[in-house]
Structure formats: C-alpha cells, structure tokens
Image: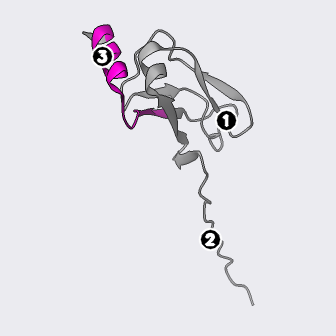
Amino acid sequence: MASDLVLVIHQAKHARFERHGNDLHATVKLPLVAALTGGSTSVQHLDGRSLKLPTEGLVVKPGTVVRLPGEGMPISKQPGQAGDLVVHFDVQFPGRLDEQQKRLIKQALG
C-alpha cells in the first residue's frame, strides 16, 4: 500500500541572523562615538568570515541599514547566486553623562 510522506521543516532561530527569503538580516550594535566619528566595524558571517561594513567616514544614524549584495543565503537552483546580507545598525547611547561630558559635547557639536 503506497502512501505520501510529509516532511515538516522548522527553521531554528539564530542568535545573530534572521532569514527573509534569500536575504539574511543582522543587527549590529554600534557605540555612539563610533557612529559619530566613523571607523571600521564588521560582522561575523555564518561561515566564520569577518565582513567589513562600509561605515568609514560616515555618520551612522539610528536605523541606518547597509546591504551587502551576494552575502545572504544561496539561491536554490541558481548556483553561485545568493541573497543579500542586510545589516541594521543599533546605535548605543550612554545611559547618562556627567556635566563635563555634556559641556564637551555642546562645545564640539555647537
């Protein structure tokens, strides 16, 4: 007697990445000083590679998103093709500032 085989696949949650179709989304925490002054930052990919994120020379605002083409999930039946890695920046603000820090920030930013 023949019968159908039904497979149910559940995708496990990952600590850093969330899959949206062929794209991978990740949130990277960025200290306020790095967001304002630039510098390089990176994200470790699923395969262990460290991918440099293009933030040098930029002021990264809360909600800034960077897309790295071809760094997402492999596309089924399209060898060599992959979705994108979409990085969302979470700018980390300090919990409090003392009077001297406030004065220096006001002086620097006018």
Residue plotted at (49% across, 20% down): 34
Q: Position of residue 61 (x, y in %)?
A: 36, 25
Q: According to the image, label 2 marks what residue?
A: 8
Q: Is disc 1 surrounded by few (<14), some (14 to 19) or many (20+) residues within 10 Å? A: some
The image quadrant that residue 53 belongs to is top right
How many marks can you see?
3
In the figure, residue 103 lies in which quadrant? top left
Q: Please, what secondary structure does the residue beneath circle 3 have?
A: helix
Of pointers 3 and 2, the one earlier in the residue sequence? 2
Determine if the magenta segment contains residue 107: yes
Which mark identifies residue 32? none
Q: Nearer the viewer, mark 1 or mark 3?
A: 3
Q: Is residue 1 left or right of residue 28?
A: right
Q: Are marks 3 and 2 in contact (CB under 8 Å)?
A: no
18 vs 92, left or right, is right
Give the class, few, some or many, for how many residues have Cα within 10 Å of label 3's Cα (few <14, many ≥20).
few
Instruction: Using a 10 Å C-alpha cutoff, classify the residue at mark 2 as few (fewer than 14 neighbours), some (14 to 19) or many (20 or more).
Output: few
Q: Is 90 included in the stretch rendered in magenta?
A: yes
Q: What's the CA distance linking mark 1 and mark 2?
A: 27 Å
Tell me which amino acid carries mark 1.
Answer: His
Left or right: 48 as drawn, with respect to 9 = right
- Going from N to C along the chain, the mark reached first, 1 or 2, is 2
**Which residue in the protein does label 3 denote?**
103
**Where does the C terminus fall, quadrant-wise?**
top left
99 and 49: which one is in front?
99
Q: Nearer the viewer, residue 78 or 84?
A: 84
What colouring method underlies this structural image?
A: one colour
